[in-house]
Amino acid sequence: MELPQTVKVVKGFLAEWGVCSRTVLLHQVPQTLSCGNNTIAIGLWSGDIIILDAITGSQGAVLSGHIDVVRSLAFSLGGTSLVSGSDDETVRLWDMQTGGGVKTFYGHHGRVFSVSISSDCTIIASGSTGGEICLWDTQTGELKRMVEQQDTVVHLSFSPIDSGQLTFISGGDIQQWDINGRPTRSAYYGSHVAFSPDYTQSASWRGTTITVQNSDSRAIVAKFSVADGGGGECCCFSPDGRLIVASAGKIIYVWDIASPNPHSVGTFVGHFDNITSLVFFSSSCLISASDDKSVKFWQIGVLSTDPAATDPKPTPPASAQIKSISLQARDGIVISSDSAGVVKIWDILTGFCKASFQTSLTGGVWRDAQLIDGRLIFIWYIVQYGYKQICIWDAEEDKLLQTLHISGCRGLRISGDGSKLFCLDDKILQAWDMWTWKPVGEVGLEGNSLYLDSFCPGGSEIWVQSKDLSTQGWDFGTLNFPPVPLCKTFTEKPHLGFIGGPSRQSHSPPWIKNMVTGKKVFQLSGRYAKPCEVQWDGQYLAAGYDSGEVVVLDFNHFGSQ
């Protein structure tokens, strides 16, 4: 079965100096990134290259041709061509306008670790574990020159302002040569190197220290130390040359090197595994890839425009857990509430927060929220002074609208059409009208350890799931008639369901399961919230992170499978 290629994660937390605005999750580990002309290319372990829109994060073409890991990618200056290097010992040139391969270059005797294309697009350079540096003619495909090193060529790049200048790293030395294979500057030590856009400065790793130098004089501009992350090391300059960004292990560090006193401006934490690649899309947008199968978009220095930051009420702690999710795909939004009482509205397509409201509702186990006729309604179960009740609030005004006294609660939900409020109490399912607060029906249920199923259709239907994964469905939408049981087949309910992690003791990643065949078809990564923080409508699945992020999966391309 085809797996979902991308997942959007909308920002649910604020970093000190920026935000994670979107995450794209992949079914494979992304090994390398490159960005050009509003397009992101991601090299995978399978040998495929995924193309994403850098603005929306949506997936475009998949370039297939390599038969092993894609280690390196490089766009041409105008973004019309893409070069890739792979463990299959080949280099490929791709036409980004057609999405097809142009040429394949053979000649390496080892895995191709690095590729670059000259600014005039006439020469491709590639370096491999065999120690070869190959220079290829892009028009004829011929090997123009091969320069052999004793060690693996782990990095290689053309100067963006001089097509005849090549920088590479081999054997722990950073070297600069011309295209005729002659050294132009003395070598210096480093395990990774990056150059500013105007090539006047370079940044290189040595142990846990990153050194920024003048490219000509080698005079030190700044030195920064980082924690030993135990993983890969990457660094890059922002397009305006103002920032230097580096990663060690799972952490991204950001420094301002344009000020008279270069200094740290923040760190980004959000990946669950080592970061493999960093690239800037714009001066304020950084993109990272990680072994945790995710690609994250970081908006740098945007707190002044973030809705949560401009909210006149206090901003909640960054670590507030997501406590409820409401998926309103028909309106293109997801609504979340966290343990700090903040209710947020997210745009599904862009992944950005549209509005944020601080409420006083910081307790309670069961809750839900929905935008109904322009009003953000929040429902909340609380036990206070011995009374068990559901509170209905206007989240924008933080105003109590109504209370409903009940005997207990194991789950709360507003119906998909916003007309009813559901409450599950042990083996009884009750429903009230959302505006008159009058009861509209209740049903007795069968089974043990019941909880509201993650499937939430657009009308007044609701499904209840038991511990053995069996489900019961009811339609409360028929006026003046009792609730109607839904068929116990999967005619009304999509056969792809969310399972896993139902207990508070278990934090194992949940699965998407084919409920007909019983096969697990896709597993989410990271520490996700419980089933009460998940909703699924047959196309989209929205789930909450304990870290405060919200993930939205689009399974539309599953089709009839």
Image: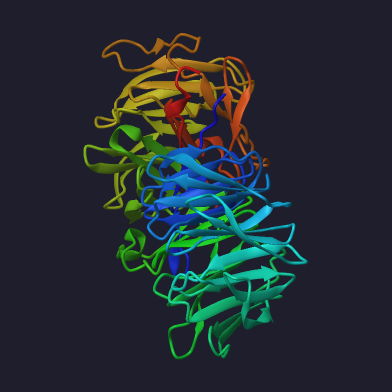
Q: Quick check: can you spot residue 444?
A: no
Q: Is residue 85 above or below residue 537?
A: below
Q: Please identify the residue farthest to the left as the structure is shown.
A: 373
Q: Identify the residue at horizontal 48%, vertical 63% (top origin).
A: 118
Please provide percent x and percent y for residue 157.
Answer: 55, 66
Q: Quick check: can you spot residue 202?
A: yes
Indicate left or right for 326 with 191 as reference.
Answer: left
Q: Is residue 518 above or below residue 123?
A: above
Front position in the image: 146 or 284: 146
Instruction: Name the image quarter holding the N terminus.
Output: top right
Q: Is residue 197 above or below residue 395?
A: below
Please provide percent x and percent y for residue 249.
Answer: 66, 62
Determine the image quadrant of residue 284: bottom left
Indicate left or right for 67 with 6 as reference.
Answer: right
Q: Please identify the residue farthest to the right as the structure is shown.
A: 150
Total number of numbered labels?
0
Determine the image quadrant of residue 37: bottom left
Front position in the image: 16 or 8: 8
Q: What's the coloring here?
A: rainbow
Q: Identify the residue at horizontal 52%, vertical 70% (top origin).
A: 245
Q: Identify the residue at horizontal 71%, vertical 75% (top origin).
A: 207
Front position in the image: 325 or 153: 153
Indicate left or right for 79 with 446 as reference.
Answer: left
Please provide percent x and percent y for residue 183.
Answer: 63, 78
Front position in the image: 182 or 351: 182
Please provide percent x and percent y for residue 427.
Answer: 53, 21
